[in-house]
Amino acid sequence: MQTLALGLFNGISYGMLLFLMAAGLTLVLSMLGMLNFAHPAFYMLGAYFSYTFAQLLGLGYWCGLFAAPLCCALIGGLVERYLLRRVIQFGILGPLLLTFGLGIVIVESVTLLWGKHSVPYAVPASLDFTLFSLYGIDYSAYRAFTLVVTIAVLGVLYGLLKGTRIGTTVRASLSHPEMVNALGHNLPRLRTNVFALGSALAGLAGALSGNIIGTEPGMAAQLGGILMIVVVVGGLGSLAGAFVSALLIGILQTLTVSTPLSWSDFLTPLQHVFSGIATNEALTQPVSRFAPLVPFAIVIVVLAIRPRGLMGRRN
Amino acid sequence: MSTMNSGQPAVGTPIQQSLASSGNAERWHAFLPPRPNRARSISCWGAALIAAIALPFIFPGTLGISVLTQICIAVTFALAFNMLLGGTGMLSFGHALYFGTGAYATAHFLNYFGEAVPVVLVPLVGGLAALLIGAFIALFTVRSGKVIFAMISLAVGQLAYSAATIMTGWSGGDEGIRLDPTQAAGWGIDFGSPLAVYFLVAAWAWLAALAMHTFTRTPLGRLMNATRDNAERMNFVGFDPVMIRGLALTLSAGFAGIAGALYALAFQVVTLDTLSIAQSTNGMLHTYIGGHTTFFGPVVGAVLITVISAHLSTLTDAWSLYLGIFFVAVVVSMRRGLTGWLADLSRTGASVYRKGGAKCVVKQATPGLFGGIAICAGFVMAIEMTRSLLEGMGAPVRVSFGSLGTAFELDPRQAMYWIFAALLFAAGVGIIRKRHKNRN
Amino acid sequence: MLNKFSPVLRRSLSACMIATLCALGALGIFAAPDAHAAPPVKIMVIEPMSGPQSSTMEASAKNLQYAVKRDNDAGGVLGSKIDLQFCDDKFSPKDGKDCLDRAIGSDTHFVMQGIGANVTLTLVDAIEKYNTRNPGKELILINWAGLDEEMTGKYCSFWHFRTDGHIGMKMKAAVLSLDPSVKRVYLINMDYSMGQNADAATRRLLKQYRPDIQIVGSELHPPNRVQDFTPYVAKIKAAKPDVILTANIGTDLSRLIRAGNDIGLDARWYTVYASQHGQVTTIGAKGVGKVYQASDSIMSMNNPVIDKLVEQSRADGYGDFESVRLYRGYLFLTDAIRDAKTTQPLAVAKAIEKTTVSIGDYKATMRASDHQAQLPMNLSVVTADAKFKQEGTPWGFKLLKSFPAAEMSEPTDCKMKRPPGA
C-alpha cells in the first residue's frame, strides 16, 4: 500500500514535469502542424539561460526564471521567421529535418559556450526546504513550487486558447489558414508567435527543472525520446491527450521502478501449471530493471490499437 | 508524310495522320518515354566497379583502406535508407535497428557455425535476419501517416537499443561480440588481410547498389514512388498503400542488414553502437545532404560525409557543430541536396557559357566563391578562437595548410584577430549581397 | 527586406559550402605527414575528445600533456623526445579503429585508451590481429581506466596492459572498509556491463568477506537515461540500509546523490567515481562526511611527490592535476621503455610485465599472468578539511585508509596466448 501510494505520488510529480516539457511541443504541433525536434534543445537553452542570468550574472533566480523563457521565445521567433518559413514549402520532411539539424546545432553551441561539464545551476535558497514528509520521504518546497507553476501556466494557456479571440484565431488557422489570412489576420506573424510561445514553454520547463535534474550538455538528448513518445501516445495535436499520456507514462514508469516484484511473482498463481519456470534465472529478474522499456511498450501498444493516439483527431 | 496515298486529303490529328500514312507499328516508338540506354548504364556500373577495385591502390595504407571500407558500408546503408525516404516518402529515424540486427546476426552465425560457413556468402545471413525483423516491424508501424511513422521508428529503434543494453547475453553488452572471418571457410582467400576484406565489402556494396537500382525499375519500385507522391490515389487505382509501404520497409531493412553484415566483417567486433541513434542519424545525414530525390544522391553524400568525418575530427573538436550547420544549410537552401544543386549549377553554368563564354562564367562565379570562402573563414576562425579560449587555455589556434607548407597562428587573446574574423565575415556577406543586387 | 535576403542567404550558403568542401579537401585529404629528423617516441591517446563523453578528457588531457612536458624538459626518454598525439574516437569503435589505423600509418607503437569498454575491446581485437601479421611492428595498448573484469580475464591479451584496478578490486576496497557496525547494505548500479560487473562482484565479495551483512535490496537502472531518481531513492529509503554501494559514474551518480539528499536519505554512500570533475559541486554540503570513495587515487593522497605535482601543475597553468590514474599508465610505459633500453614493442611489452611504478612511496606492480596492475586502493571521504579542494568548492577528498596492493589482488581466469619470443 505504501509502495503504491508513494509510486502514485512520485509518478504524478514526474508526469507533470513531462507534461510541462511536452506542452510546448504539442502546442506547436497542433497549431503549426509541424513536429519540432529542436524542442529539447530549447529546454536545454532555458536551463542554461536561467543559470546564466541567475548565477553567472548574479541577478537572482526569479530574474532567471522570467528572462530564460523570454530569450527562448526570441530565438524561437527568429528561427521560425528566417528558417522554418523557407522549408515549410518542402513538404512534411522539411521542418522535421530542419528542426532536427537545429537541435544538433543548438546543443553543440551550448556545449561550446558553457563547457562540457554540468553547470552548478542551483535551487534558490528561499525554496530549499522540506515542505512535508510522506511515509518518511521528504518532499522539497521547490518541487511543490514547480508543480504549482506548471498547473498555473497550463491553466492560463488553456484559457487563452479556448476563451480569447486570439486563441480562436489560432485554432481557426489550423483548419482554414487561407480563410483566416483572407479575413485580415496576419497569419505568418501568428505562426511566428505560436512557435515563439512553444519555445518559451520549453525554456520555462528547463528553467524550472534544470536545477533538480542537472544542467549539462546531455540533457536534451536524454529528453528527446520520451517527449516524442508522450506526444504520440497522447495523440498528435491534443493538449489534453498529452496531459493524459504524460501522467500515464509517468505513473506507469514510476510504479514499475518502485515495485519490488519480479516476473516470476506474476507467474506464481500459475505455479502448478508451469512448475519450474518460475525459478528460471531470466524470470527472477526484477520488473524494475525493465522500467526504461515501459514508455516504448506503451507507445507500441497504443499505436497498434489506436493509431491516432489516445485523444488524437482523425486527420 | 501524306505522300503515300496521293490524291487523298489528310484527316485527323498529326499523330493519326502519321500513323495512318506509314501503317507501321514501329512509329509508336516516337511517343513512348525514352528507353534506358543499356550501353551507358552498363559502362557506368562497370566504371564504378573498376574504380572500387582501383581505389585501394591509389590510397594505400591501413587508414586509406579502412576509410574506403567504411565508405562502402555507408553507401549501402544510405541507399537502403533512401529506398524508404526518396523511394516511398517515409522517414525512418530508427533504421539502425536493421543495421545492428544484420551485424549481430552475422557475428553470431559466424561464431556458431564456424568452419562450415563460406565468408563470401555470409552477408546474406545478416540481410535475411534484418529482412525478417523489418517485416515484423512493418506489421504494426506502417498503417499511420508519415509523421507518426517517423516517431514510431524512433521509439522502436530506442527500444531495441535499450533492450540490447539490458540483455547482454546475446548482445555482448558494452564489450560486444567478436568474430574472426579467418575461422570460417575462406575459399582460399585470406580474410585476415584488410585488403581482402575491403574487396569483399566493395563487391557486396556494388551488388547491393545494383540490386537496389534495378529494383527501382521494377513495378513495385514504381508503385513505391507513386505511393510517395499520392497515397490516396493509389487506393483508388486499386493498390493498397499500406501493403506497398510494408514491402518497402521490409526490403529496405534487408539491404540495411547487408550493410550491417559488411560492418561486422570489416570491424570484426559488433557493439551496441550499431543500434544507436547516431548510426540512424548518419544514414539520414548522408542521404539528405547527398540528395534524396535521385538514386545516386545518397552515394555522393555517404562518400563525402564519411571522408569529411574521418578527417575533420583531427583538425578540430567542434566538428559536430560544423557538420550540424552544414546539414541545416543544406536543408534550408538545397532541397534536392548536393546532387540537385550541382545539377542546377551545371545547367546555369552551361547557359552562361553559351551566352558569354568562359570569361563570363568566371566573372559570375568568382564573387560567389570568394564571398563564400570569406564567410566560412571568418566564421570558422571565430568558432575556433572561442573554443580555444574556453577550453584550450587560450592557446593560439594553428591553421596549417600542410601540403602548401604554410601556417598561420591566431591568438584569441588579442582583439586584432577577432576584428579580422568579423571583417572577413562581413566582407563575404557584402560580396554576396552586392552580386545578388547586380544580378537583379 | 525579407525577400531580398532569402536568395542572398541561399546563395551565401551554397557558396560557403563549395568553398568549405574545397578547403577541406586541400587540408584533410592531401595533408602529408611531416618527417622528423630524430625519431621521437610516439604515443597516441585514443579517447573521446568531443561529444557527451569528452568531459573527462578535458582535464585529464592537460594533465598528461603536463607530464610529457616535464619529461621532455628533463631530456625525454632514452634521449628522444616524447610525441604525444590525441585522437578523437568519438566514443565509437569505428572511429577508435580509425585512430588505430592512424597510429599504424604514423609509425606509432604505443597506444593509450581507457574510456569506453566498447572501444577497448575493439582495439584489443584489432591489435591482436594486426600484431600477428606484422611481427616487429606491433602495437601495445595501455588501458588506463577500463573497469570490466573480463578485459584481464576472458579477453586478456599479451599486448594489452591495464594499469588501473578493475571494478572487482575497487568494490573489494569498498567492502573491506565497511566498519563492523554496518549490517544492512543496498546496491544500486547502472544497467550495462560495468554496472552489472560491479553488482556481481559486490555480491561475491560481501558473501566472501562480510557474510554477516544483509543485502536489503539491489537495483540496476538504465544508464544515462533516468532524469528523476526519486522513485529509486524512495525505494532505498524504505529499505533502511546503513550503507549504499554504487559504482555509478557521471550524471547518474550526481543525480542519484542529489535525489537522495532531497528526500532526506540518511545512509552513507560508498562510491567509486565521486571525485570526478563536477561531482563535488553537485554533491554539495549535504555530502560532507557521508560520501565515501574507494579508488586508486585522489588528489590529496598524503604523498609529497603527488602534492608537489598538483601544486606545480596549478602554478604552470595546466589546471588541477586530477588524473593520477592516467599519469600512472603513462609511467608504466615510460619506465618500461627505459628498462628495456629500446622502443621495440616486443621488448617493451616484456619489460612492462616486470615493471613497478613508484611515485614517492606509492608503488604499483604489473602482474605478468594477466597484465593487470596490482596497486593499493584507498578509501576517502568528502570533507571540508581536505588538503586540495576541488573545482573551487570548499570541499575535497581526504584519505581515510589505505589498502596494500597484496590485499587488493583478485584472482583471474586469464589464459594468455603469448606470441613467439615472449
Image (cartoon, coloured by chain):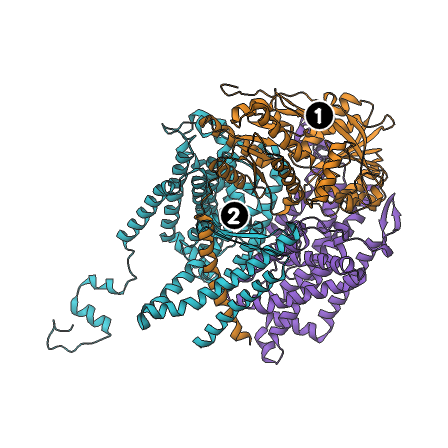
Chain colours: A purple, B cyan, C orange
| Neighbour tally class for label 2: few under 14, some 14-19, many 20 plus, Cα within 10 Å | many
* Element carrying mark 2: helix
Reading the image, the residue beneath label 1 is C363
Residue at the image point whose x is 89% and y is 50% from the top? A132
Q: Is residue B393 left or right of residue C228?
A: left
| Neighbour tally class for label 1: few under 14, some 14-19, many 20 plus, Cα within 10 Å | some
> Mark 2 falls within which chain?
B
Reading the image, the residue beneath label 2 is B138
Label tally: 2
Residue at the image point whose x is 41% and y is 67% from the top? B365
Report the quarter where the N terminus of chain C lies: bottom right
Residue at the left extreme of this rendering: B6
> Mark 1 falls within which chain?
C
Task: Give the alpha-carbon distance from disc 1 to disc 2, as whole Å.
Answer: 60 Å
Report the disc number at residue B7. none
Q: Is residue A65 left or right of residue A237?
A: right
Which x, y percent locates residue C193? 64, 34
* Element carrying mark 1: strand
Q: Where on the picture, by quarter, is residue A141?
A: bottom right
Q: Amino acid at mark 1?
A: Lys
Q: Amino acid at mark 2?
A: Ala
Q: Is residue A34 visible?
A: yes
